[in-house]
Image (spheres, helix red, strand yellow):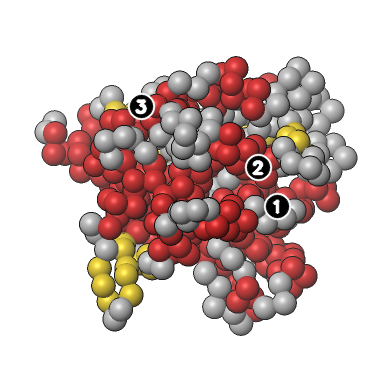
Amino acid sequence: MTSSTIESHLERLRSLPTIRQRCTLVHNLAQQGRLEYFEYHPEAEAKVVDFCSTIMKRDYRSFEEIPPHGRWRHFDTGKERINPLLSTWSSRTPSIPKEEQCARLLDLFLVSVLLDAGAGNAWKYQEQDSAGEYYSRSEGLAIASLDMFKKGLFSSNPNDKERVDAGGLCSLTISQVGTAMQVTSENPMSGLDGRAGLLQKLGEALKASPKYFGEEGRVGNLLQYLKTHTESQNGATTVHISKLWDAVMLGLAPIWPTDRTKLNGVPLGDVWRCESLKAAEIQSEGEKSGLEGEVLGLVPFHKLSQWLTYSLVEPIEKLMGWRFEGMGDMTGLPEYRNGGLLVDLGVLTLRPNVLSSEFYPDPSSKIPRLPPSHPAIIEWRAMTVIELDRIADQLRTKTGANLSLVQVLESATWKGGREIAKQLRGDITGGGPPIEIESDGTVF
């Protein structure tokens, strides 16, 4: 086994195009009825499209107004918070330059996305302002992280609070994170320890990658790295999405748990083995040994990394005026809102009695609870990636609008997944998903 062979496999499993390629293979099995846990009903896609298009027409007068799916939306729940923050920075004496404002948003958005693993159905956050509104789930985590950012919890410099750097992150404790997020026995949060540990690991990763984050280990220094890869075309500044993706995948690699899927001892992050795909590959190609055997059935999702990348693209394009090329390599996000929409509206159904009773902790409920490594979850997530492409295509046809995938995620599928969940289970789980995924604070 050569190091070049290992590196080629690692590079392939980390690349954006591989996500869609491997998920397509799982989707092909579904069309043949060869998934182990799910049955696929493509005729139900029309119901999803109708449901989503109704939401889109309700919420947007013009589909051109639909913003991209990203963390920015969560910060602005109920009212704008990011633009007023930018206005505050611009009005200071001396005013903060646009590039530094963008760097600060990258600081905030990255740490906020990493805090955005499932918080559970019980946790809520009271905003630290005069209104004192309560928020939960992703929005609550976003607003909590914004308050933490303003207070300087992520900065090592008490005279420069609104930034994120390695020193500030490495000094954080579980107690500090829990207090800042208002966690108590009456207001419990899933995966608090994992969440705090992830921030500390982020600090170490920033220090270890000066190529991307500078000697001071600051997220916002990504701008300086990206600048070296920009091109000028007809007066416009462009940069390929693969450059930002490399920084996210390689620069943040040390933060991922080491007890997940590995290849030759190297943790792969959000890459999991789909047992039904492995069985199909063995059937078609035969058993394999060594490294070739290790990669059988592996499906990359890199969901958190993609969510982060989408979220970083928006402030860079808005404040720097750059344009990212190659965005078509990005995929829909395989998480429980997008995936839950498909289950709740019948595109995907669990096979009868395929899960044992141990995965139904509440005997009176039909909602299973599974670890993220369970092969049913891997099938569900792979199917979600390709179904989001299919739903997006059908929405373009139905609406006649040239919708980007990120606009579909924002206006239709993610929101649709939340709304159908609330309709079906609002009085049971507070609108939780049809299949619950155990959260350790590091995965969605």
- In the foreground, 268 or 70: 70
Circles 2 and 3 in contact, beta carbons < 8 Å:
no
Element assignment for label 3: helix
Q: Amino acid at mark 3?
A: Glu
Decide if residue 128 is on the left or right side of residue 8: right
Which secondary structure, mark 2? helix
Is the residue 440 above or below the residue 431 in the image?
A: above
Q: Is residue 38 left or right of residue 433?
A: left
Residue 204: image tag: 3
Residue closest to the eye, 240 or 94: 94
Crowding near pointer 3: few (<14 within 10 Å), some, many (20+)?
many
Are discs 2 and 1 less than 8 Å apart at CB?
Answer: yes
Q: CA distance from mark 1 to mark 3?
A: 31 Å
Instruction: Work out whether mark 2 precedes mark 1 in sequence or the reverse, and give the earlier one.
Output: 1
Neighbour tally class for label 2: few under 14, some 14-19, many 20 plus, Cα within 10 Å: many
> Which quadrant would residue 119 be assigned to in this image?
top right
Residue at image point 29% right, 51% down: 224
Residue 307 in sight here: yes
Instruction: Name the spot of residue 389 as percent of width and height, x first.
Output: 52, 63
Compare marks 2 and 3 and give the one earlier in the sequence.
Answer: 2
Amino acid tagged 2: Ile
Compared to 21, does 430 lie above or below?
above
Q: Which mark is residue 77?
A: 1
Q: Residue at x 32, y 70 (%)?
A: 237
**Location of mark 2 (residue):** 143
| Quarter of the C terminus within the rendering | top right
The disc labelled 1 sits on which kind of residue?
Answer: Thr
Measuring from the top left, give residue 184's x and y in whole percent.
Answer: 73, 20
Element on which disc 1 rests: loop
Q: Where's residue 53, x and y in %?
A: 70, 70
